[in-house]
Amino acid sequence: MLKVKPPDEYPPEAGRYARGNDYSPVAVCVILNTFDFKIPDELEELVMAALDAGAALAGMLQTENIGIEKMVCNLVANPNIRYLAVCGEESFGHLVGDAVVSLAKNGVDEKRQIIGAKAPTPYLYNLPLEVIERFKQQITVLYLVGCVDKAVVSEAVKCCYQENLTDFSYKAEMYRLYDPGAFGEPLIHKIIWKVKKPWLAQGERKQPFLAMKDVMDVRMNKKRRGIIKYLSGVMQVHKIEIKDIFALSDWELDFHLGMLKKGDFVDIYEDVVMITEEGVYLAEMLKGEMG
């Protein structure tokens, strides 16, 4: 079967992944559904199990926009990769497993939104349509969402590089897998960060604010206290004045704002903090008014 030597630029995007066998036909995506500073050992072990079994790339995916964009860039840069196994527990806020499967099946609409994705902000504005189409043609997604079993992931990887058709199943999904060889020539694309907030790219929108009473309502709901790590450091802009909602220490404030920024729940401009549409979506969802 035909194999292609990946170009020197491969993989073009940095991220939370490790490189394995460049000639392997499969990559493994482990959903990161926790804070990125406290990754469970079982997720790290899934990544290592995939590499040990022979995966070309294995790593973690946390977001349904820039995270997927980076992953797609790395996959299409290596034509030998023909399968993407998506495993790990689905993430509550980002629903990245569903987003990846929807992208492979449906592509994107005219607004670069992944068709059929349930995620809050599944926009791929940093990818040319050529790259998205190449991903759809080159990659078959193996839906192992919910699986944290190293043996199952390893078996999926091994089935992908067999010369003859090999049956593999997980729950209700049935696959006949083999290594079909390289898909043409490498396609190199590197994200240049033109659109950092793609859900705001469809024209001018008034930046929404979260009322203090709404934040307090969320904070007082004991059942949802865990997510307050994201919301407790939010500051509200009101009449050009910045008000600290919970009077955190400087260290705590910097920490929480940093986490919020990573999660795309706030925009930070020097001394001004504004809540994004995704931040409002999260707060509404926590109040039980959405999703």
Image (cartoon, helix red, strand yellow):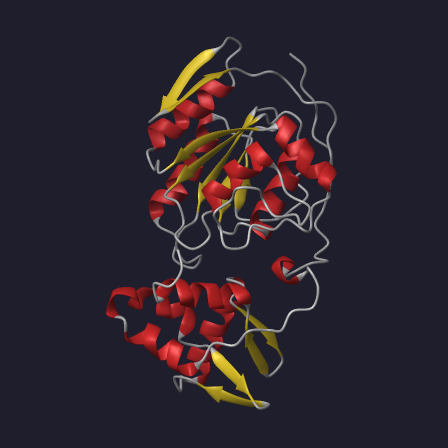
Farthest-out residue, left: 222
Farthest-out residue, top: 164
227 relative to 16 in the view: left or right: left
Q: Nearer the viewer, residue 136 or 71?
A: 136
Farthest-out residue, front: 289
x then y, percent, for residue 276? 55, 69
Q: Nearer the viewer, residue 174 or 210?
A: 210
Q: Which quadrant holds residue 247?
A: bottom left
284 relative to 65 in the view: left or right: left
User: Is residue 256 visible in the rendered structure shown here?
Assistant: yes
Residue 213, relative to residue 77: is it above or below? below
Q: Which quadrant holds residue 87?
A: top left
x then y, percent, for residue 229? 38, 69
Residue at (61, 59) in percent of width and height? 199
Residue at (61, 37) in percent of width and height? 107
Q: Nearer the viewer, residue 117 or 34?
A: 117
* Picture quarter with the C terminus: bottom left
Q: Which quadrant holds residue 93?
A: bottom left
Count of numbered circles on the image: 0
x then y, percent, for residue 283? 42, 68
* Picture quarter with the N terminus: top right
Residue 99, relative to residue 76: is it above or below? below
User: Is residue 9 visible in the rendered structure shown here?
Assistant: no
Residue at (44, 57) in percent of width and height? 36
x then y, percent, for residue 226? 31, 65
Q: Nearer the viewer, residue 91 or 120?
A: 120
Residue at (43, 24) in percent of width and height? 156
